[in-house]
Image (spheres, helix red, strand yellow):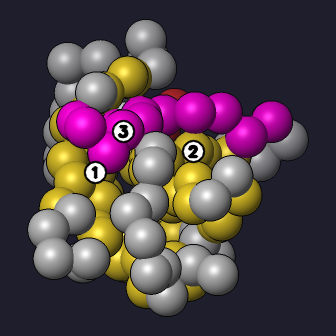
Amino acid sequence: QVHLVESGGGLVQAGGSLRLSCAASGSRFSINDMGWYRQAPGQERESVATISRSGLINYANSVKGRFTISRDNVNVRNTVDLQMNSLKPEDTAVYYCYAIYLGYTYWGQGTQVTVSS
């Protein structure tokens, strides 16, 4: 079983930056895809960015050019970060880290990101 802990959320003005981090623990083997989803009030959870174990990256169209996902999976240490620049009020949401491990999807507890106009 994989345990995910997120950090780095908060309140920022439009145009500002935040960096989210997620640390995975409990895996004995390599974790496959990792990434970030977000859920705004009254909306469905949506994918923001994903990164495979080999480094293949996908972004939602709404964040391309503004967000950068990175991953460190050296020495069984698994972390995934999301650098968010040029933040907009519509980026306000709870951001969830996820990891796919041995066919199961694990989720973090979520971290709130609020962008004021």
Which quadrant does the N terminus fall into?
Answer: bottom right
Judge left or right: residue 84 versus residue 58: left
For the residues labelled 1 and 3, the Cα–Cα distance comes to 14 Å
**Relative image position of residue 107 (x, y in whole percent):** 64, 66
Range shown magenta: 44-55
**What residue is pinned by disc 2?**
37
Dots 1 and 2: beta carbons under 8 Å?
no
**Which residue was labeled with disc 3?**
52
Residue 49 within the segment the image draws in magenta: yes
Going by the picture, which residue comes out furthest to the front? 29
Q: x, y percentage for residue 115?
A: 41, 49
- In the rendered view, tell whether residue 15 sits above or below residue 58: below
Residue 10: which numbered mark, if any?
Answer: none
Compute the Cα span from label 3 to label 2: 15 Å
Q: Secondary structure at mark 1?
A: strand
Identify the residue position indicated by label 1 in the image: 82
Circle 3 crowding by C-alpha within 10 Å: few under 14, some 14–19, many from 20 = some
